[in-house]
Image (cartoon, grey):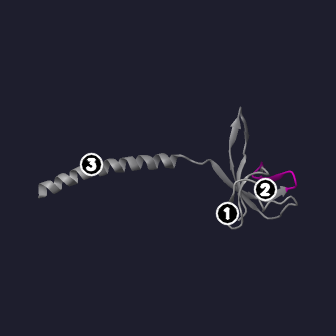
Amino acid sequence: MINTLTRRIGVGGWRGGLLLVVIALLAFYAGSIRSGVSVHSGVPISDVSSITIGVDGWAYDIPLDVTWFDASGGIHENGRPSCLPPEGTTSSVMFGAIEANRNGVGWRPVVWVDCR
């Protein structure tokens, strides 16, 4: 009885150990992947044809067709964010941008806007 139990624990321990190693490697890999999105907030300057937010020496041009979250947290895959009307606003807006670089020229495209 004890020998059978020891054998079962040994086999289970080996399989369990291997499973733990696989889980640890997957967790490490998943943790090393970063979205690369930086989050900022600022007061926009907007009109009918453009939206710009200046933060930390960068001018972020927000596309008129961008993914955005409405006041209740609903996601919109495209369109002009409701918190960035053409007539402008004095409220701060949170947004996400990524860093892009081509031939030594860098810019930060905005990928989402949060109107909550």
Q: Give the range drawn in magenta.
A: 46-60
Q: Looking at the image, which is closer to me, 12 or 78? A: 78
- 58 magenta-colored: yes
Pointer 1 or 2: first along the chain: 1
Pointer 2 or 3: first along the chain: 3
User: In 3D space, how far apart are the residues under numbered discs 3 and 1 (Cα atoms)?
Assistant: 46 Å
- 13 magenta-colored: no
User: In 3D space, how far apart are the residues under numbered discs 1 and 2 (Cα atoms)?
Assistant: 14 Å
Q: What numbered label is drawn on residue 14?
A: 3
Q: What numbered label is drawn on residue 74?
A: 1
Residue at the spot of label 2: 80
Q: What numbered label is drawn on residue 83?
A: none
The C terminus sits in image quarter: bottom right
Q: Where is residue 54 in the image (x, y as percent from the top left)?
A: 79, 53
Q: In which quarter of the image is residue 90?
A: bottom right
Identify the amino acid type marked 1: Gly
Residue that appears at 79% across and 54% down:
53
| SS for callout 2 | loop
Q: Position of residue 95 (x, y in %)?
A: 71, 56
Left or right: residue 14 compared with residue 104: left
| SS for callout 3 | helix
Q: Looking at the image, which is closer to me, 14 or 106? A: 14
- Which dot, 3 or 1, sits closer to the camera? 1
Residue that appears at 29% across and 49% down:
15
User: In 3D space, how far apart are the residues under numbered discs 2 and 3 (Cα atoms)?
Assistant: 56 Å
Left or right: residue 25 compared with residue 93: left
Residue that appears at 81% across and 57% down:
44
Identify the amino acid type marked 2: Arg
- For disc 3, the neighbor class at 10 Å (few under 14, some 14 to 19, many from 20) is few
| SS for callout 1 | loop
